Image: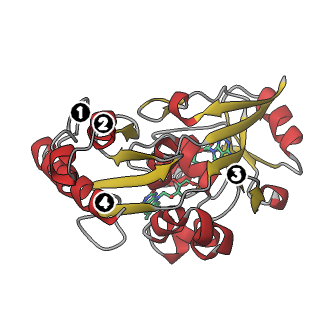
């Protein structure tokens, strides 16, 4: 199908994008277009105006920011894969990005778009929740920082206000981290995936496709902190989750798969 008709404007700056969003309540930002355009083609969404921020190259960077790494929201998945700073200080981001879609998706899709889209199957959404990242957004009243724990409000719903642009993602430097993903076919979305990392001396674990948002496996984390073995801690993976049943697998299958992946991730940390 082809999308319904829409107007198009290319923003030359974040402030201009914010202004354009303010002028049309059915406007949407366009970054890499690899989640939005498919939805428009299916007519699940019909924005009246697309505000293209895809060429804002000043939002395309990975920088050392002391004990954190700052990533511009327009940084492409392929750039995350080959970035040396991330490889050194937060390697699980590159690992996760390398498993997203195919080369075309990785060269167009952006980290900001992946997170702002609020898809529970987003690999990078789970990573930011696992790492307690900070998400920086700019809107009409200036800039604010949203903890990743408060960002995902529901399936495809986030804490971003209508006129806000996600500009930067700040992640801690971590000494160890792993992202394990199982998909039905090569280059597919995760049936289930698991992130695990040592953050400030604590083991933190996140789950992809185990509920309406990216989730933290808090019971697993508590068990690890209490000295449980990887297998015993992983037995608590499904606590507080609501895995969906769909063509990729039943909820029961997902719960089992997640437990296996959590055990393996803990063993690898
Ligand atoms: P867009 O599609 O441009 O935008 C998505 C949404 O976010 C829109 O609502 C837009 O308005 C909003 N938005 C975009 N940028 C911002 C911003 N800076 N601030 C505020 N709002 C913003 N993803 C995975 O995680 N794992 C996969 O395995 C995977 N496989 C894929 C396979 C295929 C074939 C395709 C087409 C996509 C796949 N994706 C996968 C999704 C891919 O990662 C997308 O690129 C990503 O989800 C969206 O990023 P984008 O830059 O393309 O955003």
Q: Residue furthest top?
A: 141
SS assignment at label 1: loop
Q: Are the residues tagged 3 and 1 within 8 Å (C-beta)?
A: no
Above or below: residue 83 compared with residue 212: below
Q: Give residue 152's position: percent from left, percent from top.
A: 49, 32
Question: How much space separates mark 2 and mark 1, taking CA atoms?
Answer: 5 Å
Which label lies toward us, 4 or 2?
Answer: 4
Q: Mark 4 packing: few (<14 Cα in 10 Å), some, or many (20+)?
A: many
Residue 250, above or below 182: above
Which color mode does the image show? secondary structure
* Dot 3 or dot 2, earlier in sequence: 3
From the viewer's perspective, is 231 left or right of 157? left
Location of residue 78 (image quadrant):
bottom right
Mark 4 or mark 2: whose residue is earlier in sequence: 2
Front of the two marks 3 and 1: 3
Location of mark 4 (residue): 265
Q: CA distance from mark 4 to mark 3?
A: 24 Å
Residue occupied by mark 1: 242
SS assignment at label 3: loop
102 left or right, relative to 74: left
Classify 10 Å Cα crowding around label 3: few (below 14), some (14-19), many (20 and above).
Answer: few
Q: CA distance from mark 1 to mark 4?
A: 21 Å
Q: Earlier in the sequence, mark 4 or mark 3?
A: 3
Residue 176's spot in the image, x, y percent? 47, 62
Badge 2 crowding class, 10 Å Cα cut-off, few under 14, some 14 to 19, many 20 or more, is: some
Q: Is residue 167 left or right of residue 98?
A: right
Q: Is mark 4 within 8 Å of ligand 1?
A: no
Tell which circle, 2 or 1, labels the residue nearer the N-terminal end.
2
- Label disc, if present, on residue 211 of the rendered structure: 2
What residue did someone put label 3 on?
Answer: 67
Question: Is residue 126 visible in the rendered structure shown here?
Answer: yes
């Amino acid at each position: 199908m082809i999308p319904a008709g829409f107007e198009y404007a290319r923003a030359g700056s974040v402030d201009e994008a914010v202004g354009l969003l303010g002028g049309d309540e059915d406007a949407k930002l366009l970054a890499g277009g690899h989640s939005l355009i498919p939805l428009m083609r299916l007519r699940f969404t019909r924005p009246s105006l697309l505000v293209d921020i895809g060429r804002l190259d000043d939002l395309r960077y990975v920088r050392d920011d002391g004990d954190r790494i700052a990533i511009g929201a327009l940084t492409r998945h392929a750039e995350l894969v080959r970035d040396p700073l991330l490889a050194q200080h937060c390697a699980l981001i590159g690992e996760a990005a390398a498993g997203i879609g195919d080369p075309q998706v990785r060269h167009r899709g952006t980290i900001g778009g992946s997170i702002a889209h609020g898809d529970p199957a987003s690999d990078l959404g789970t990573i930011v929740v696992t790492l307690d990242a900070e998400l920086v957004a700019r809107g009409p009243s200036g800039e604010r920082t949203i903890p990743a724990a408060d960002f995902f409000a529901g399936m495809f719903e986030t804490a971003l206000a209508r006129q806000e642009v996600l500009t930067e993602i700040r992640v801690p430097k971590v000494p160890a981290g792993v992202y394990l993903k199982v998909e039905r076919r090569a280059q597919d979305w995760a049936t289930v995936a698991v992130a695990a990392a040592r953050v400030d001396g604590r083991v933190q674990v996140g789950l992809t496709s185990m509920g309406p948002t990216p989730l933290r496996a808090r019971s697993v984390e508590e068990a690890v902190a209490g000295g449980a073995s990887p297998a015993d801690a992983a037995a608590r993976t499904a606590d507080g989750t609501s895995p969906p049943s769909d063509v990729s697998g039943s909820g029961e299958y997902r719960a089992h798969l997640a437990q296996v992946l959590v055990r393996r991730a803990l063993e690898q940390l």
